[in-house]
Image (tube, helix red, strand yellow):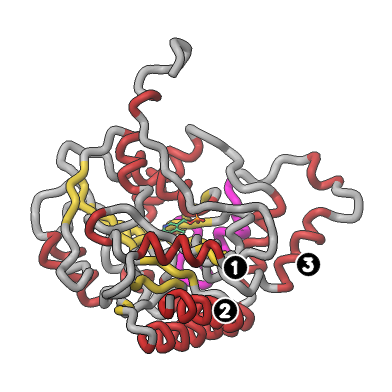
Amino acid sequence: MSRFWSAGVADLTPYVPGEQPQMQRLIKLNTNENPYGPSPRVLAAIRDALGSDAEALKLYPDPDARRFKQAIATRFGLEVANVHVGNGSDEVLANVFQGLLKHDKPILYPDITYSFYPVYCGLYGVAFETVPLSDTFEIRAEDYRKPNGGIIFPNPNAPTGRAIALGEIERVLTDNAGSVVVIDEAYIDFGGETAAGLIAKYPNLLVVQTLSKSRSLAGLRLGFAIGHPDLIEALERVKNSFNSYPLDRLAQAAGVAAIEDEVYFEQTRQAVIASREALVERMTALGFEVLPSKANFVFARHPAHDAAQLAAALRERAIIVRHFKNARVAQFLRITVGTDAECETFTDALKEILAG
Ligand SMILES: *Cc1c(COP(=O)(O)O)cnc(C)c1O
């Protein structure tokens, strides 16, 4: 706290990211990174964009990231005018909160969800109301049938991993034709059904995705939103009032290559899905209750072991997982799906810990 701070800074509650230890030899299952690394075409594209003497870096990048937007538009059968891109989907979401969700009525999002949403509400002065998940931790369309200034939730939800069906999303869209409905699809490629195909039908739908998880580019910071051009225009206005160049040259080139390499994408996401199913089976055998997951993580609790203690015992064995303090889920752990070998080391450690 200092007298030099602008008004309001002291009242902000910044997001606390999962721990990012910059050391090796840890089994890192705490922030939902992809264990496989990006497509080899990404490295080739970065080298190509850099050139042999890095001369390209003296020039500003394309402020509109047109090639990257075009690659996304092509993949989803849309136009460039349907696409907004940003420095990770966190930045895209920030633009969404500022540009599309600030109205008189409060926005709605689940009580258990991505903990960045309340942070953006605090930063941009967006009123919100939380909607409890069902007893089985599901988002239910009917619970969003009340006056609101917008709706946002992840599908699959985080940190539960539970997905809702496209039919339910359509109900939310038709029940709330006067509000923007934002579906945060950070984990959609691990088994959920994307709402991207509904964009032509619903001008109030915005779909947000990231290249951090299924494309394994968390370190490059690439995310995007797709929706009706009127929604995209608001996001572009906000972005261009803040930073003309949020995506550097290397990131833009890498983003195109990552989106275009469908074969690698398909292989790695299927590998993660297969590892998840094996992990769920082994954890269930150890007595865990594991919520049905369509994400690259699982959310689980053990009826006889405290979650914080389990997390601490895992850490002693150099394995880190995520534990949230929110009372409703304080007995759960969120575990990122690693390679099969990492998952096995994890369940072997659990077996030892449970045996006490
Ligand atoms: C990981 C995540 C994001 C943001 O990812 P970026 O790395 O900023 O693209 C957004 N929403 C949810 C629900 C996430 O889990």
Of labels 2 and 1, earlier in sequence is: 1
Q: Nearer the viewer, residue 41 or 274?
A: 274
Q: Which residue is mark 2?
A: 345
Give the class, few, some or many, for how many residues have Cα within 10 Å of label 2's Cα (few <14, many ≥20).
Answer: some
Of labels 3 and 2, earlier in sequence is: 3
Q: Residue at x 19, y 51 (%)?
A: 130
Q: Residue at x 46, y 76 (%)?
A: 350
Q: Nearer the viewer, residue 107 or 58?
A: 107
Q: On residue 44, which mark appears? A: 3
From the viewer's perspective, tell me whether residue 119 is left or right of residue 75: left
Q: Quick check: marks 2 and 1 in contact, CB under 8 Å?
A: yes
Q: Quick check: marks 3 and 1 in contact, CB under 8 Å?
A: no
Q: Which residue is mark 1?
A: 27
Give the class, few, some or many, for how many residues have Cα within 10 Å of label 3's Cα (few <14, many ≥20).
Answer: some
Mark 3 vs mark 1, CA separation in Å: 28 Å
Residue 143 percent across, percent down from the top left: 12, 62
Mark 2 vs mark 1, CA separation in Å: 9 Å
User: Which quadrant does the C terminus fall into?
Assistant: bottom left
From the viewer's perspective, tell me whether residue 254 is left or right of residue 343: right
Q: Nearer the viewer, residue 119 or 106?
A: 119
Q: Is residue 184 magenta?
A: no
Question: Dot 1 lies on which element?
Answer: strand
> Magenta region: which residues?
64-81
Among the 4 quarters of the image, the one containing residue 286: bottom left
Whether disc 2's CB lies below 8 Å from ligand 1 is answered no
